Image (cartoon, rainbow, N blue to C red):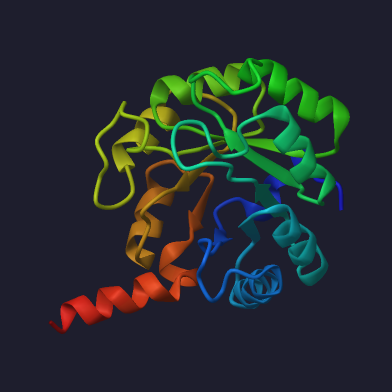
Amino acid sequence: MILSPGGLESIQGRLIVSCQAYPGEPMRDPRTTAQIAASAVTGGAAAVRVQGLADVQHTRSAVEVPVIGLWKDGHDGVFITPTLRHALAVANAGAHIVAIDGTRRDRADGLTLARTVAAIHTESHALVMADCGSLEDAVAAADAGADLIGTTLAGYTGERPKTPGPDLELLEQIAAAGSEVPLIAEGRIHTPAQARQALDAGAFAVVVGTAITHPATITGWFADALK
């Protein structure tokens, strides 16, 4: 499957499930990621988002929906697919869409976001999802040629406060800016009601991760409620 910008209708108005586990966790295994992704698709996910080259490879073999791939390198600053080298490796692993840091911050390889996006388009068949943290990021990423804009980094770059749930205000701001680039709501969406709110705020599609695919966190919510 080669996904084109015009082929994104399959995810419009639908759920994308982020299937990730942190290093050192029992579920941190590419085969497990692929099984979780397949289960999410069975439940109705229109696409999945996974981290790591092996995870992308295994998941591509397990599902027949678009795979959004990324490579986290580090923990602070620009660490979501931080360079062109990382992005092309994710694309070569089989990702239909490569998620990259889409903020206005400096990238480790010195390339601008526009040059990075252009190179991904030129050197692979993958689309680009720009993970942004503010309205200014989103506008710049659209101008840079990104195929999708995500609110993934809202509350994590210092430009906006970290909201307890999804940053609906940011979604509304980006939607009102009038860009034709599909807007993907991602970040702290923990309930079906919040997912619906994100869609109503102007999102093209909604990503849910922790609330579906991270048992340790979900268990903690229940355990804390019983204390």
Q: Residue at x 53, y 18 (%)?
A: 106
Residue 197 relative to residue 85: left or right: left
Q: Residue at x 87, y 29 (%)?
A: 123
Above or below 216: residue 185? above
Task: Spot the residue most to the bottom.
Answer: 226
Residue 44 location (% of width, % of height): 60, 71
Above or below 184: residue 115? above
Q: Residue at x 33, y 63 (%)?
A: 193
Work out whether residue 133 or residue 54 is closer to the camera in this orientation and state it. Answer: 54
Above or below 19: residue 203? above
Task: Spot the residue most to the front.
Answer: 24
- Residue 7 visible here: no
Count all numbered tags in the image, as a single digit. 0
Work out whether residue 6 or residue 18 is closer to the camera in this orientation and state it. Answer: 18
Q: In which quadrant of the rendered image does the C terminus lie? A: bottom left
Residue 62 relative to residue 139: left or right: right
Residue 132 location (% of width, % of height): 48, 32
Residue 176 relative to residue 158: left or right: right
The part of the image, by quadrant, that contains residue 20 is: bottom right
Work out whether residue 141 or residue 28 is closer to the camera in this orientation and state it. Answer: 28
Residue 36 location (% of width, % of height): 62, 74
The part of the image, by quadrant, that contains residue 130 is: top right
Work out whether residue 48 or residue 59 is closer to the camera in this orientation and state it. Answer: 59
Residue 177 location (% of width, % of height): 44, 22
- Residue 57 visible here: yes
